[in-house]
Image (cartoon, helix red, strand yellow):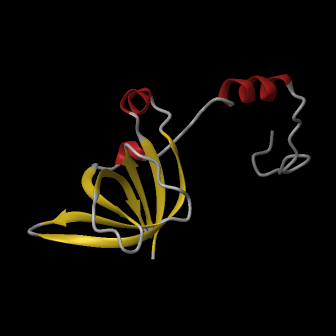
């Protein structure tokens, strides 16, 4: 077979192929998240613009303008939150909008009543 020759029908997938069906059946219940590659940090979560009382959470992922926070309470989608975390001898506060949230799917999440929230910084 010539390595430089493109496939006969590029981009075509035969979804009726038994090998593909088998692969899809084995992966349909997968639930992946990126929480394993980040050192978790305890944070304080203030819900709403005028919140004076914080609730505990854990920052488990951060990249660009996205934060993933674990809590033991649910925060509705669209809610404005302030996340405070220690940075040296000071606190860093970030305002965010809750873009999505759900119950944790890992066994340890379920055992501890963990919710996972995806936040976009403002």
Near-viewer residue (78 or 17): 78
Residue 39: x %, y % from top left: 27, 49
Near-viewer residue (19 or 60): 60
Residue 46: x %, y % from top left: 34, 63
59 lies left or right of 30: left
Q: Within the image, what quadrant is residue 63 found in?
A: bottom left
Quadrant for the N terminus, please: top right
Which residue occupies 27% across, 58% down?
44
60 lies left or right of 26: left
Which residue occupies 76% across, 22% down?
22
Q: Compared to 120, does 72 lie above or below?
A: above
Q: Compared to 20, does 64 lie above or below?
A: below
Single out the residue that lies furthest toward the left: 89
Q: Within the image, what quadrant is residue 99 found in?
A: bottom right
Residue 92: x %, y % from top left: 23, 71
62 lies left or right of 86: right
Q: How many marks?
A: 0
Residue 101: x %, y % from top left: 52, 51
Quadrant for the C terminus, please: bottom left
Which residue occupies 87% across, 35% down?
15
Single out the residue that lies furthest toward the bottom: 122
75 lies left or right of 14: left
């Amino acid at each position: 077979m010539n390595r430089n020759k493109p496939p006969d029908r590029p981009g075509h997938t035969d979804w009726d192929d038994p090998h593909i069906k088998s692969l899809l059946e084995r992966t349909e219940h997968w639930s992946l998240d990126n929480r394993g590659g980040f050192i978790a940090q305890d944070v304080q979560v203030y819900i709403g613009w005028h919140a004076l009382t914080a609730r505990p959470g854990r920052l488990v992922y951060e990249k660009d303008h996205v934060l993933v926070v674990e809590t033991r309470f649910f925060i509705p989608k669209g809610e404005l939150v302030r996340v405070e975390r220690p940075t040296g001898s000071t606190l860093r506060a970030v305002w965010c909008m809750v873009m999505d949230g759900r119950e944790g799917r890992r066994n340890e999440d379920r055992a501890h009543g963990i919710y996972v929230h995806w936040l976009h910084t403002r």
